[in-house]
Image (tube, helix red, strand yellow):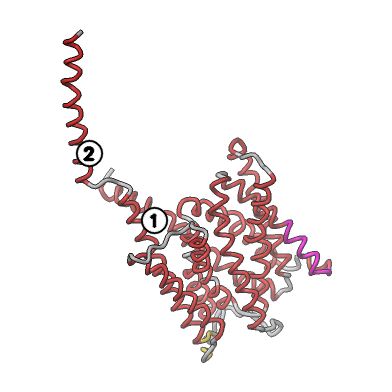
Amino acid sequence: MSNNECAFGVMYGKYKLHLIMVLAQVASSFLYFLLEASINKGLNPHVFVTYRHAVGGIVVLPFAYVRERKAWPKLTMTLFMELFFLSLFGISLTLNMFFASLKYTTPSFVVSMTNTISSLTFIFAVGLRLEVVNVKKPCGLAKVFGTVLSLIGALLMTLYKGHTIESLQGTPFHIRDKLVHINWIKGSILCVASCISWSLWYILQAIIVKKYPAQLTLTAWINCMGAVQSAAFTVLVQHKPTAWFITSTVELCCILYAGVICGAILIFCQFWTTEQKGPVFVSMFNPLGTVLVTTLAYFVFGEKLHIGSLLGVVIVIIGLYLLLWGKESDEDYKSQQSFPTHVEQKECRTQIKTSTEQEAPRRNVTLDTN
């Protein structure tokens, strides 16, 4: 194997999880616009969440049975309730509020608000001692300062709109029509509540994946239970049977894409990555989704932008990547501390050699006496 191949293998092993999270954000970005087009066609957001995770559960279940049935842990009542709340915070409660907020705001605003998830997850993780912060070190200060900065940016996006940047003329698609009712207050409340619930989901993931190591099965559980919870909620708030009908190809494609890609594959990737790197790492890649959605919204779909939103996005991204730098630096320091230095290894070998030389005469004396 050549040196280039060895170097590539080392780099891939180090940044494999980063690449997975980047691809996950790319895949998720397209869903916002596909869903908005479906909502404009008449798709109910709550029905969408139900169908999405029903499809996700159906897709994952056969793979989980074939590959992991021998590794299934015993399903106790405690574990069942943990799975229930994981589904509640991760799917039925979070996504119903999140996608409903699209009716009152815009995709770029909604995805910008998801940047607060990383900061909220970090705060919850510190409170539950899943994340350690040492303010005496630069990496610890970067974590704290990055968290505060990202929250300030999120408040700026919510409270300040500023000058409007008109959409480009001649963009290929225009998916927002006049039937959509813009209500920034209601949309912001729904979106913020969704982000808090989403952050709690990342925390629960980190706790439960240690008890339930079969990620495919866990993905199937979450999708199926989330679909049932969302269906029960939809029945309570939506009394029209016609809301459950799929009336266009756009709606069908949106449900299939969301179920297979986002409900099945991406949730499995998140569980696996959370087990490897923790909940804060997974949530740190949301800013990439903001950049992608904002860019597509303006240049491709002809959406207007606001100065307040752009400033908020920039501040949030700076804060979050300060947090990312602090976390990565902290992990590098811990990994260095977990291995003995060259001097420590030399001293250890010297001590072993000395003790061996001291024990040798004793064994000889014992043999001479006998």
Residue located farthest toward the top when viewing the structure as drawn = 370
Tag 1: amino acid: Tyr
Q: Is residue 23 left or right of residue 217?
A: left
Residue located farthest toward the front when viewing the structure as drawn = 369
Q: Is residue 161 left or right of residue 234?
A: left
Q: Which structural element holds mark 1?
A: helix
Answer above or below: position of 4 versus 21: above
Q: Nearer the viewer, mark 2 or mark 1?
A: 2
The answer to whether residue 278 is magenta is: no
Can residue 175 be spotted in the picture? no
Q: Main secondary structure of the magenta part?
A: helix
Q: Position of residue 236 (x, y in %)?
A: 80, 66
Q: Residues within 10 Å of mark 2 (few under 14, many from 20)?
A: few
Residue drawn at x 82%, y 68% is: 242
Residue under pointer 2: 348
Residue located farthest toward the bottom when viewing the structure as drawn = 163
Q: Which structural element holds mark 2?
A: helix
Residue under pointer 1: 15
The answer to whether residue 239 is magenta is: yes
Which image quarter: residue 190? bottom right
Q: Which segment did they paint magenta?
A: 228-240
Pointer 2 and pointer 1: residues touching (CB < 8 Å)?
no
Tag 2: amino acid: Cys
